[in-house]
Image (cartoon, helix red, strand yellow):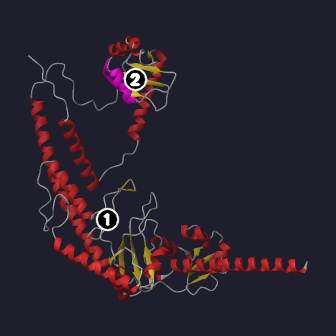
Amino acid sequence: GSIINQKSNSKEKETEKKKRSRVKQLLGDVKKQVEFWFGDVNLHKDRFLKQLIDESENGYVDISVLASFNRMKKLTADTKLIARALKNSSVVEMNLDGTKVRRQHPLGETPINVDSRTVYVELLPKDVTHSWIEKVFSKCGNVVYVSIPRYKSSGDSKGFAFVEFETQDQAHKAIEMLNNPPEEAPRKAGIFPKTKNRKPIHVAADNPAAALFRRMFVYCVCLCVDSPSQSHQQVDPETGKENQEDATVKAKRKRKKKHKEKLKIGEEVIPLRVLSKEDWLKLKEEYMTLQKRSMASLKKCINKIDQNENQSVMETESRPQEENAPSEKAPPHGPQFTSGVIVKMTDTKPLPGRQAIKDTLGQICPVVYVDLLVGDTEGHVRFQSPEDAKAVCDGKAELQKEHSWTLEILTGDSEQRYWQKILVDRQVKLNRPREKKRGTEKLIAKAEKIILARAKQANKHIRFFED
């Protein structure tokens, strides 16, 4: 019995020891995180926390606010445990109640050499974390700050990060040691991702400036005007890459040689591209300049097309119009009440899509609008005239050979109520806020619209009627 008790006590002690170890680790992690938030390096960048400190009384921030931060949520939500972790901190101090925390010393001046101590890194793993980057780059020196830009919609990394070191020499060492891009990587560095509705737009793995140039080149060629190829660089329109084959070959040889040397020493070679932030800023400026030049060229060609189209419209309007010729533009106001043009359509099973209904009924008479939700067994179809609506209902016997639809022209109160619904739906649609496209996005959308319209016109079937 005593042996069993001894074993039981031993297990309890072991469990208690592990628990204390976990708590100690947690307290250390909490302390490290809060000291980082209130440290000089972070506060010069963290506008939200700095504003909280500036606006608070005596620089105190409530511990419950810190507990609401995502990083802290991953560690703990217990404010008492956070207070316990900060008791012996050399960076922050708490109020007498143990509910608020502040810096022990005032924040110094903004450092002026941050960019020279910071490196830009790309070709990162998709699931990259701050701790992974810190672990890899701490071999080269003391990492004081890591920034991983992410998409707000998905939380995914944008594919690059910035790592700030304590000294400039450490940053240079990181570039020398860790700049090992694989041979299949784009020759030129720089990732400048685009988003649409806060979601990433995925493009082919290529130099972004070259990809942008190629896209603009295609648009300009499609719109039959001069392309932005009058750049100071010699660019191949097919590939969008500079014709500097010799430099590319030399760079590949150099990387291969460096890679082999590292393998000889037995070092782990991580396929990353690392360069100074200053060099990255130059690349960004180059990208922006190329984008502006491309946009200017695209805008010029769109304006040219608009002028030509306006001229052709004026010429068309100056000609006498044929009698009973249908008007090209619909009136700016909504649909006007016309009795006998609304047909109610029902079925025992869900009706097909709006386009399918429009195509089927359109074989008898032109359809103006189909009001139907996916999966509904009831819908409404609006026609141009009462005669068209009547013609469709008269032909329902022919339609019912293929479809089990029931057609009925609305009259009386039912018709009045439906027209009221049309007006309400239209007002809701008009009041809905529209997302305005600006700048580059607006120009590209307009160019794509013109190209699609031209392609549609080119594929249009032309009928030749005999006299």
Q: Which residues are magenta?
A: 354-369
Kindly tell me whether residue 415 is visible in this rendering.
yes
What residue lies at 40% left-to-right and 13% top-to-bottom? Answer: 396
The crowding category of the residue bearing disc 2, from other C-alpha atoms within 10 Å (few below 14, some 14 to 19, many at least 20), is many
Q: Is residue 164 magenta?
A: no
> Disc 2 designates what residue?
381
Q: Is residue 356 magenta?
A: yes
> Disc 1 designates what residue?
192
Q: Quadrant of the C terminus?
A: top left
What residue lies at 36% left-to-right and 74% top-to-bottom? Answer: 272
In the rendered image, the vertical position of residue 159 relative to residue 146, given as above or below = above
What residue lies at 57% left-to-right and 77% top-to-bottom? Answer: 60
The reply, left or right, for residue 136 in relation to residue 215 is right
Q: Amino acid at mark 1?
A: Phe
360 or 256: nearer the viewer: 256
In the rendered image, the vertical position of residue 373 relative to residue 110, given as above or below = above
- For residue 333, what is the image quadrant? top left
